[in-house]
Amino acid sequence: MKGIPLLDGKIISSLTLFSYMEKKVESSNNSPLGDGGKRLIVIGGGAAGFFCAVNAARMNPGLQVIIVEKTSKLLSKVKVSGGGRCNVTHACYNIADMIKKYPRGGNFLKKAFHHFFTTDTISWFKERGVDLKAEPDGRMFPVSNTSQTIIDCLMIEVNNYGVEILMNKEVKEINKSTDRWKILFANYATMEADFICIASGGHSKSSQFEWLKKLGHTIESPVPSLFTFNMPANTITSLMGVTVENVAVKIGGTKLSETGPLLITHWGMSGPAILKLSAWGARQLATDNYKFTAIVNWLPLYNEQSLKDKLQQVRFEIAAQKISNRNPFALPQRLWEYLLLQSGVNLDMRWADLPSKEQNKLIKNLCAQEFAVNGKTTFKEEFVTAGGVVLSEIDHSTMESNITPDIFFCGEVMDTDGVTGGFNFQNAWTTGFIAAKAIAAKAANTNIAGN
Ligand SMILES: Cc1cc2nc3c(=O)[nH]c(=O)nc-3n(C[C@H](O)[C@H](O)[C@H](O)COP(=O)(O)OP(=O)(O)OC[C@H]3O[C@@H](n4cnc5c(N)ncnc54)[C@H](O)[C@@H]3O)c2cc1C
């Protein structure tokens, strides 16, 4: 089993380390504070919370840093992310291009990325012995191809900088007590802190943000993002497993439109084009109760007029050949035959014999086939929630609350979310790092330079 070196030189498994940390931190409430006498409590043991905690502890050794996590698991999403490989970030080195991948929070992150960008993420992990590699579509993974490498790296940092971890500690309320913040846990235990970083991630219900509302923050109501479309009883589902390299999908009656690969599933449609559309349309589609029309252009290089011209040419060039055998657009054969049948074209018909009524139907089906969507499927693809703490209440250069001083936010708890491809973790690293730097500096009453 892969192990993590501890300060005392022992190598233990990550699992053992978790319980080691748990034992170690149960005494945290009474443990003495560092030289600076300040305590940071990070709420949430996910990517953003860990990144904030380890960087703050490293930048300000006098700061006592404690992560409190409501479950018995740490970094659980990192573990399962990217199919167990962890899509750490995206090989995008231009901020203007990067922010186009965030349906919510792009402008906020534009400023934040100037402080810590994808290049900083790559260097940060590299400096700690973790090389990332880019796949042709831009997604970046650890060279090891396992998310455990990222978990191990963060756990080593936890150990190196003495970050303490309390598990099974659900925060229920935060109140001001004299000049410090007081945290109330679900088991009625309390802890005090000089600084709090809230990294509690996204939630599917508004009620789960109640404790943040009580603190004075405004919550943009949560709705799911990154889901697939249900098309109950639609015959297209008979083509389950068929993938089309590049399609354009629009949502009827809106301006929402996306291009990219599409996968036909046994319940409807999935794949990057659909997931992107679900992210950009998250709010609108929730309002419509996930009942809408998806309009698919199977040949996005054509519109109805240019396709008509192309078919004229095809009919002339391969007039004697069977339409079903000669698919001039390199669409998957099963899809091509399905589209012909949907257009009333007999599979034995030759191109020369295609009547104009059927040809017009085929053009319509190729360029603008309509599918009634009724519902969404979360499956494993519902990676993120749109909604959370409104960004106007957070300072983008420090992640500090504009309403409650010394309270900071990072990661998905804020009203930021990206499409798939490593953008959500980049949000966690960027905002976690910025919060860490600001807290470390504030605790030391000074500025801290560099990464
Ligand atoms: C299956 C799956 C795969 C994904 N794959 C990718 C990917 O490959 N690349 C990518 O960029 N993104 C991916 N994502 C999205 C990404 O995982 C999240 O955006 C990211 O984990 C957010 O990090 P976070 O630290 O803000 O929140 P989280 O990772 O959700 O962590 C928040 C933590 O806070 C804890 N918590 C919540 N409330 C409290 C409370 N009151 N008290 C104490 N603790 C609390 C939670 O238990 C949790 O451990 C994936 C998501 C899922 C679900």
Image (cartoon, rainbow, N blue to C red):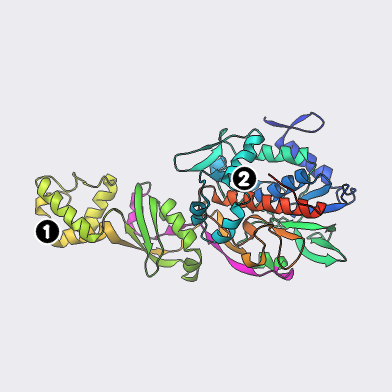
Marks 2 and 1 sit apart, C-alpha to C-alpha, by 56 Å
Badge 2 amino acid? Val
Circle 2 Cα neighbour tier, 10 Å, few/some/many (<14 / 14–19 / ≥20): many
Q: Which residues are magenta?
A: 213-240
Q: Which mark is residue 78?
A: 2
Asked whether the viewer can see residue 168, the reply is no
Q: Residue at x 74, y 68 (%)?
A: 215
Badge 1 marks a residue whose secondary structure is loop
The answer to whether 100 appears left or right of 255 in the picture is: right
The residue at which mark 1 appears reads as: 355
Magenta region includes residue 237: yes
Which image quarter holds the C terminus?
A: top right
User: Picture quarter containing residue 132?
Assistant: top right
The answer to whether 286 appears left or right of 371 in the picture is: right
Which image quarter holds the N terminus?
A: top right
Badge 2 marks a residue whose secondary structure is helix
Magenta region includes residue 254: no
Residue 148 location (% of width, % of height): 63, 37
Residue 83 location (% of width, % of height): 54, 42
Badge 1 amino acid? Pro
